Image (spheres, rainbow, N blue to C red):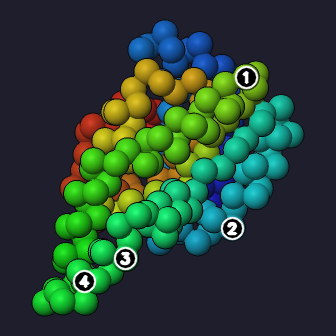
């Protein structure tokens, strides 16, 4: 928990520095607040404090839970009943579910669309900030780095990703600490 608190202090300093410093480098204002995967629960418990500190600093934060986005997509999807029926006859329902969801989510930009919708609603706010939580819900279907790449150039407000994982070199992250290090993140990593 100490590391998350210290990392948040660094994030807050960077946010106070303004978006223009990042935009000049060609990067979108996307920050990954990295913490060990075993601290996911502590990070969720720390979120109200993060929000309060951001508000005290003059920011207007909004949280987007990717678990809620995916759950809503799944529970309201027109093909849900067919997916469930197909799994009943499967020899390996878990593997089939993973494959089906991965394919569907690759074609349906539900996560990217939800992020864009929030970014657009925050655009008029001079100090709006989007905080993405529950990105572990994407595993094993999608990678947040791929979503970030698809949205490149569209981050109109600072976006903070609460990232359970480890940081390798200055440009690589390992999601959940067990996935192979990935250098496809174009953002600032703190932690």
Q: Position of residue 121 (x, y in %)?
A: 67, 33
Return the residue found at the far left: 91
Which quadrant of the rendered structure holds the N terminus?
bottom right
Return the disc, 3 or 4, that comes first in the chain's sequence: 3
Q: Earlier in the sequence, mark 1 or mark 4?
A: 4
Residue 124, numbered circle: 1
Name the residue: 78% across, 33% down: 59
Q: Across the whole image, how many numbered discs are drawn on residues?
A: 4
Q: Residues within 10 Å of mark 2 (few under 14, many from 20)?
A: few
In this rendering, position of residue 11 left or right of residue 150: right
| Nearest to viewer (mark 2 / mark 4) | 4
CA distance separating discs 2 and 4: 35 Å
Disc sitting over residue 45 in the figure: 2
Q: Are marks 1 and 2 in contact (CB under 8 Å)?
A: no
Q: Earlier in the sequence, mark 3 or mark 2?
A: 2
Marked residue nearer the N-terminal end (2 or 4)? 2
CB under 8 Å between callouts 3 and 2?
no
What's the residue at 23%, 80% (across, down)?
86
Residue 122 occupies quadrant: top right
Whole-angstrom CA distance, mark 3 to mark 4, is 10 Å
Task: Classify residue 44 as left or right of residue 172.
Answer: right
Does residue 30 appear anywhere in the picture?
yes
Which numbered marker is on residue 24? none
For label 4, the SS is: helix
């Amino acid at each position: 928990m100490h590391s998350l608190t210290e990392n948040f202090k660094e994030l807050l300093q960077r946010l106070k520095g303004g978006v223009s410093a990042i935009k000049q480098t060609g990067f979108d204002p996307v920050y990954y607040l990295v913490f060990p995967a075993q601290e996911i629960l502590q990070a969720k418990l720390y979120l109200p404090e993060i929000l309060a500190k951001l508000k005290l600093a003059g920011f207007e934060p909004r949280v987007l839970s990717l678990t809620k986005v995916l759950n809503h997509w799944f529970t309201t999807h027109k093909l849900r009943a067919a997916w469930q029926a197909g799994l009943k006859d499967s020899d390996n329902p878990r593997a089939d579910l993973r494959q089906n969801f991965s394919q569907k989510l690759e074609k349906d930009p539900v996560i990217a669309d939800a992020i864009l919708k929030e970014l657009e609603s925050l655009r008029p706010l001079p100090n709006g900030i989007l905080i993405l939580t529950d990105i572990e819900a994407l595993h094993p279907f999608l990678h947040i780095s791929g979503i970030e790449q698809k949205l490149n150039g569209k981050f109109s407000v600072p976006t903070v990703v609460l990232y359970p994982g480890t940081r390798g070199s200055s440009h690589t992250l390992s999601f959940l600490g067990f996935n192979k290090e990935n250098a496809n993140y174009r953002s600032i990593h703190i932690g």
